[in-house]
Image (spheres, rainbow, N blue to C red):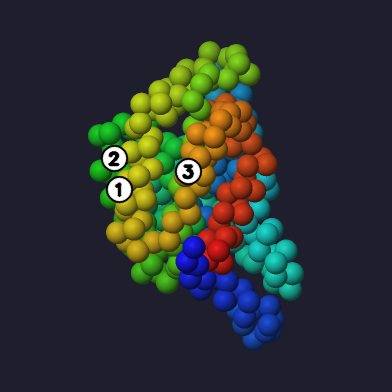
Amino acid sequence: MKQSKEMAIIGKIRNKSKDLYGSSAPMIAFLGDSVTQGCFELFVQEDKTCDTVFEPESSYASRTIEILEFLFPRVSVPFVNAGISGDTAQRGAARLAKDILRFHPDLTVVCYGLNDCSGGMDYLKTYRESLENIFCRLRENGSEVIFMTPNRMNSRLDPRIREEEILAIARNTMEIQRNGVFDRFVEAGRQTAKECGVTICDVYEKWTRLFQSGVDTTALLSNGINHPIRKMHYEFAHSLVEVMFGL
């Protein structure tokens, strides 16, 4: 198998490791939704609205930095986690300047699709246009870009979910996963990234292969809907680091 090219971010971290006082520390930014932010279990509040457990220290963003700093122990890698629960690519494009561009990151990881697909096929064009907007503006700002495809959503109803408010969400995401709408969004994201010359980290493909091999991927979701369990965030992180190194 032909090895991919090492990304510039690795060279920048390596240079910093060799010249701590002379080289600047490269920054990595993460833009996305609840999975990026580090959201896990869902629960119903007294007013019957749903909320989530926020644990950003267990997010793939934090785990990615943890791995990079393990590999380059002399370097502290600054990063920005701009994930927001419930976010979409359209809203991400709208907040890109204030949440990402002003930091001038050397690399930005973009991950959208989980919430976008709820808009149905009518939203697909907006999803693609929003991703293109994000990719182009990041590159114009001098940032390398990785588009990371999201994880699979639930393909069955998890018996752990008993609250009707959460079950209603799970029924909707299960339908979107089963009827192929989510697959269409993921593929649209891949195509947009390719057209924009953006590097792809295809986590969705890995989750799909696990599912096709008989793995119960719904059991790997902490909320039984779309938030991966904490251990699976390492899978995201390892995938990202492999892409950075061109492995």
Report the amino acid beneath label 3. Tyr
Mark in the foreground, 2 or 3: 3
Residue topped by disc 3? 204
Residue topped by disc 2? 124
User: Which secondary structure, mark 3?
Assistant: helix
Question: Circle 2: is it few (<14), some (14-19), or many (20+) Cα within 10 Å?
Answer: some
Q: Are marks 2 and 1 in contact (CB under 8 Å)?
A: yes
User: Which secondary structure, mark 2?
Assistant: helix
User: Residue 160: x and y, percent?
Assistant: 63, 18
Residue topped by disc 1? 128
Residue for point 63% across, 77% down: 14
Task: Describe residue 176's horizontal placement relative to residue 42 as left or right.
Answer: left
Question: Circle 1: is it few (<14), some (14-19), or many (20+) Cα within 10 Å?
Answer: many
**Is residue 234 depicted above or below 241 in this figure?**
above
Task: Describe residue 5's horizontal placement relative to residue 17 as left or right.
Answer: left
Q: Tell me which corner region of the image, top left, top right, bottom left or bottom right, holds residue 11.
A: bottom right
User: Which secondary structure, mark 1?
Assistant: helix
Residue for point 58% across, 49% down: 236
